[in-house]
Amino acid sequence: MNTLKNYYELCKPNVVLMMLITALVGSLLASKTLPPISLIAFAMLGIALCASSAAAINQIIDRKVDANMNRTENRPIPQGDVSPVNASIFALILGVLGAVILVVYVNTLTAILTLASLIGYAFIYTVYLKRATPQNIVIGGLAGAAPPLLGWTAITNSVDPNALLLVLIIFAWTPPHFWALAIHRREDYAKENIPMLPVTHGVKFTKLQIILYTIILILVSLLPFIVLMSGVFYLISALVLGAIFLIYSIRLYRDKNNENAFPTFVYSIYYIFLIFAALLIDHYLI
């Protein structure tokens, strides 16, 4: 039972769940009527397996860093519960199985984009960007922003401009989301010489960037309404959720003790769930 739990934790289930929800919303927004349930199910399964593979690869590569950070020291590989070799086999099986499911039961375009996202996060971000630049989150955020596009292409087998708007929302959301956590865990990153923005440019500068990117996020979140993809319900939801996010960001900027860093991070998670829920409600119920 503990073995299953360890492999389950290798998949970063909370992160994968967030990705799946945005992918699901993307698939449901791709059609005016409810798409075939079987197609959605196979798409979500394939995306989940590939995302879990990427999460496992990330932990294999980062195992030495994870062992020295308070937030990650209890992960299965640093604890010795899963060996790097077994984790690698597990990640390979998940990735191959996910890709096969997408090719056979969904479409090749979705499989290619999903694998590109896997490579972007597991290798380009984890191996290079994370240690190369304080803009790691900004540049590498594109891989994590892909799920709604993957869900959309699963239904339409094409890249639609509206799907790219959903990607853009997550892309703009990623920096304030992760930088709030980076402020909260600054000492961990500094200890391992990982060039997160609070480490390289200081907490004050990072707080200012969080405000800036939150404003960018609010503006980007209005695009679905502007292009008539969504209606008034979504517009009001986006403005309210964005205003609350901005309040959190300003409160964090004024906080000398950084006590609001983690609450800002937590709210950012609620924000992304709620704004995608608003898109879905507006599309089907309003």
Image (cartoon, rainbow, N blue to C red):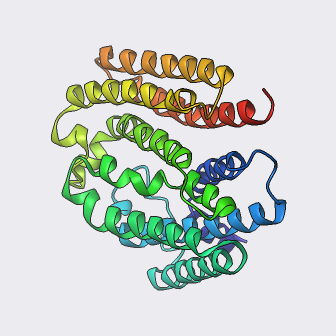
Quarter of the view holding residue 5: bottom right
**From the viewer's perspective, is 197 left or right of 14?**
left
Residue 181: x %, y % from top left:
40, 38
**From the viewer's perspective, is 100 left or right of 73?**
right
Q: Is residue 167 above or below residue 36?
A: above
Q: Is residue 31 above or below residue 1?
A: above
Foreground of the two, 20 or 81: 20
**From the viewer's perspective, is 185 left or right of 239?**
left
Q: How many marks?
A: 0
User: Residue at 53% across / 58% down in the picture?
Assistant: 159
**Quadrant including the C terminus:** top right
Does residue 171 appear in the picture of this structure?
A: yes
**Quadrant including the N terminus:** bottom right
In the picture as drawn, the residue positioned furthest to the front comes out as 228
User: Residue at 34% across / 40% down in the picture?
Assistant: 182
User: Residue at 78% across / 36% down in the picture?
Assistant: 284
Quarter of the view holding residue 187: top left
Does residue 59 appear in the picture of this structure?
A: no
Foreground of the two, 227 or 208: 227
Residue 283: x %, y % from top left:
73, 35
Quarter of the view holding residue 140: bottom left
Residue 253: x %, y % from top left:
31, 19
Residue 36: x %, y % from top left:
82, 60
User: Residue at 53% across / 82% down in the picture?
Assistant: 92
